[in-house]
Image: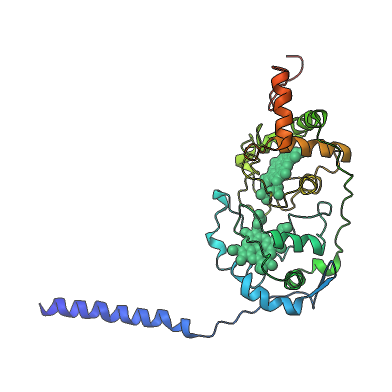
Amino acid sequence: MKSITSVVAFFFGSLGLALAAGTTPCFAQIDIHFHAVTGPMEARVGGLTGHSSDGKALYRRFCVGCHGASGDGNGENAIWFDPTLGFAKPRDFTVAVFKCRSTPSGTLPTDEDLFDALTRGFVTTNMPEWRPLSGLDRADLVAFIKTFSLRWQTDKAGTPIAIPPEPPAKIESILHGRELFQKMECWKCHGPEGRGDGPSAATLTDSKGNPIRPYDFTTGERFKCGVSNRDLYRIFMTGLDGTPMPSFADTIKPEEAWDLVHFLRTLQVSIKTPELATFKQWVSAHPGQLKPIGQQAPSGN
Ligand code: HEC
Ligand code: HEC
């Protein structure tokens, strides 16, 4: 009996010690030291000028938990985002590589690109939209993000690509876009129906070595980098840097790019776009005329 009591006492005694030891640091003052590598930075968006000195406190309050004190994307919450389930890791600002740009692949985005990206958030990820913050707050945050990489001192933002006016989404345009989707091998990653299930899809990784899934066009309306036809044009003509999604600026002519935009809209079966209606009407009037998208038999067979 006596020995059991002393075992129990010993057990609770050591548990108490362990708890005491474990809880002590919680009372310590938590101070975040940011690892800025540049001097103060500015961001210009429309008529607003953001200042990194003002962005710091906002970053500490709203962003540090995901993007981290050194801006490397390793904030406390980042471990919970599982790329194998399709959830991207927070962006690493120390390498200054960004997905949503109006500028050519490999160049820095404009301040406005970053402002727009954090305003709209990243659909299908944990990056929220920051519309509730004032415009000036968001501009201050853009300026602060730029303190994490020296690239912002050595490079200038790229020149935004020119986008010609959009032609009407006639059936000829849609069908030509469909040919491009086949010819440019978009289907190898995105799948013949745009479901993100092409033959290469399972093997793709981003520049950090994390698995990444191609976008599934059949779900929802928004893209990570916008919602409009111009956004869609920009996505495949500038590429999503840091991901396997390349830029097609060197291989697709500007006037052809609009055809591809019109075809991509027919893949959005969940929102029933006007392009899908035009396409379906043509298909039912021309049965058996379209070759299926995907691996086609080599010519001569
Ligand atoms: C809950 C987590 C979370 C919080 C909080 C968060 N982010 Fe993000 N952020 C992400 C994730 C995840 C991504 C990557 C999305 C992707 O790559 O698809 C991202 C991406 C970004 C990008 C990349 C834009 C691009 O084009 O590549 C910027 C800029 C950004 N965040 C800024 C901010 C700012 C500023 C704040 C604070 C106001 C913030 N984030 C707060 C999770 C978060
Ligand atoms: C090597 C594989 C690959 C090829 C080829 C490819 N993509 Fe992608 N694409 C991706 C991946 C991966 C993503 C998702 C990136 C992400 O979530 O950050 C993506 C995303 C996209 C998006 C959505 C981006 C967003 O903002 O949500 C569009 C639009 C797109 N691709 C269009 C195309 C078109 C059009 C082609 C052919 C001209 C093409 N892709 C070829 C891999 C590919």
Q: Is residue 52 visible?
A: yes
Q: Is 27 situated above or below 230?
A: below
User: Which quadrant: the C terminus?
Assistant: top right
Residue 178 against residue 165 in the figure, above or below: above
Question: Where residue 65 appears, x then y in whole percent?
Answer: 59, 69
81 or 255: nearer the viewer: 255
| Residue under the point 69% across and 34% down | 187
Please tell me whether residue 181 is drawn above or below residue 93 in the rendered image. Answer: above
Q: Is residue 92 visible?
A: no
State which image quarter holds ligand 2.
top right
Q: Residue at x 72, y 59 (%)?
A: 117
Residue 25 picture location, percent across and down: 47, 82
Question: Where on the picture, by quarter, is residue 70?
Answer: bottom right
Of 126 and 258, the residue lying toward us: 258
Quadrant that contains the N terminus: bottom left
**Coloration of the structure image:** rainbow
- In depth, the one of 36 and 56 nearer the eye is 56
Q: Quadrant of residue 260?
A: top right
Residue sitting at x 67%, y 75%: 58
**Viewed as shown, does residue 131 lie left or right of 6?**
right
Reply above or below: 1 against 257: below
x, y percentage for residue 245?
Answer: 72, 45
| Furthest residue in direction top, as rendered | 301
- Number of residue marks: 0
Quadrant of the rendered image containing residue 37: bottom right
